[in-house]
Image (cartoon, grey):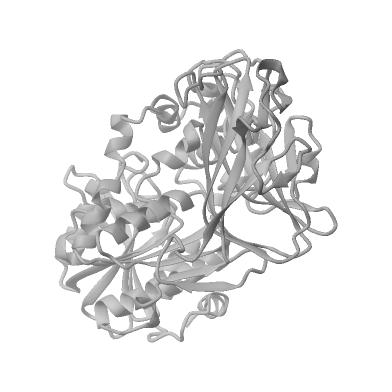
Amino acid sequence: MSPVSRLLRRATGLPAPRSPRVRVVRDVAVPMPDGVVLRHDRHVPAGVTRGPVVLVRSPYGRAGWIGAFFGRLVAERGRQVVVQSVRGTRDSEGELSPFDEADDGVATLRWVTAQPWCDGRVVTLGPSYLGITQWALAGDAGDALRAMGTMVTASQFRDQTYPGGTFSLDNGLSWASMMRHPRLSERLVEAVRHRVEAGFAAVPLATADTVAAGGPIDFFQDWLREQALDSAYWAKRSYADRVAEVARHGVAVSMTGGWQDIFLPWQLQDHAALRAAGARPVLRIGPWVHTTPAGTAAGLRDALALFDRALDGVTGPDEELPVHLELSGDGGRRRLPDWPPAHVTERTVYLRTDHGLGEEAPTVPDRGGAHWAGTRFTYDPHDPTPAVGGAILTGRSGSRDQSALEDRSDVIVFTGPVLSRDLVALGPVRATVHVRAEVEHLDVFVRVCDVDETGRSVNVTDGIRRITPTEPGPSDDGTVAVGIELWPVGHRFAAGHRLRVQVSGGAHPRFARHPGTGAALGEAEVLVAREREILHDAAHPSHVVLPVEP
């Protein structure tokens, strides 16, 4: 076992290796049906000549952390591993077409199962893009696929691209700029990060890729154009309608996510689809962002244990209580039979005219028109409300101090009383915000924060919704009731702390700023500051609904 393997084993908490010696067969060429050649490395444990194979398909190369973590570490646990570079990345031929991985994935699986060193059984493994490559092949894998070890991923990436009808600018532009030159080293990509940040400010947004990467990126332009729900582009790259089929084939699945991961809401939709089809996937969620090493390590441990059960018949404790939750805020751990938790109750907190929060619905009378109780602010896209923490792909993610953000005039803050006892929120979160505005196009961003005894506020969960003249559409009195799905939560608000709710007009560059007009995504050349009013009277009871443990 190499020194790197020893270090990684200690860091990940993996069991002792079954086979410390691993042979690597490098740069194996596999032709796809259209003649394009993809290459992989095959990690072979000493003494293994034939058996099941772990298939890993990656756009990030086969060396470095991908090869060490998902190749060698897994092989040292007795499994053969094939780590393949997807089309158009590293030394695999062709052109990268993000998320369109079904045909190559199925062809690779069939090639692997036809080899004399494979016994016909395959399991898949990996996070993020390495996760969607698993879903891409799963529906057509037949009996060969026995298990999937998925982490911080989902069966479709469309909804993460347009959360609440907005556009994930930071995630999309950062990833597109990195993948425009997928054969470059990660170090070189990081060296041009300042250009990506300049791209966030580009007007119109369709020029952001040129600013960030030195030229147009075809698939970034596709994302700007293909926002429609019935887009054929995204239909070809969505595997959500095959999730239930995976369950019916008896494929075992492990799913690892983070409370502040970019894919969590849609990963949980996949979990619900598996459960509805009768499967019992292993689900683990912890206080992690997309790239937290502890989350990746936990996902690898779960996947390897799942493979032992699916391939070797090993029994384990996950069968009765397959949902593992580690709460933020030092909220401890939970083992549950299912998600969402059945033991929680909904608690509604209302925004008050004194900028407090209360569990009683507002009683301020509705006098109509200009006499409604509300708070006005102006969202100016020339100085867009910044994103501070949250579910972001890059290093600015997670729980962050909100003090500077909450001092801004375009962030409205409502703070609850000091908690006399711990309050544990666990499950889906939603909000309804009643808005009156001089325009019909705007964004509404809602965030729930935890304020400690010193007054320090940190973000816990949030969500956004883009409003158009017809979605969700005005009420009879001309106001708009904006329903927002926030990120699912698992957090302890400690006794002595307070809840806080922020309401604003965006979180840039996590989400593309709203231009203040009805211009199509990517095309706005004029930015217009617009005023809006957040209402909180008896007729317009803006509120957040939290799932609370008894």
Q: Quadrant of residue 531?
A: top right
- Taking the image as drawn, is residue 236 in sight? yes
In this picture, is 469 found above or below 331?
above
Q: Is residue 88 left or right of residue 127?
A: left
Task: Give the x, y percent position of residue 399.
Answer: 67, 54
Which residue shows up at 45% across the image and 46% down it? Answer: 183
Task: Give the x, y percent position of residue 210.
Answer: 54, 26
Which residue shows up at 51% across the image and 62% down it? Answer: 344
Front residue of 98/482: it is: 482
Q: Quadrant of residue 506?
A: top right
Q: Quadrant of residue 26?
A: bottom left
Front residue of 40/152: it is: 152
- Taking the image as drawn, is residue 30 in sight? no
Task: Give the x, y percent position of residue 27.
Answer: 33, 60
In this picture, is 194 found above or below 416?
above
Which residue shows up at 51% across the image and 21% down it? Answer: 474
In this picture, is 297 found above or below 351?
below
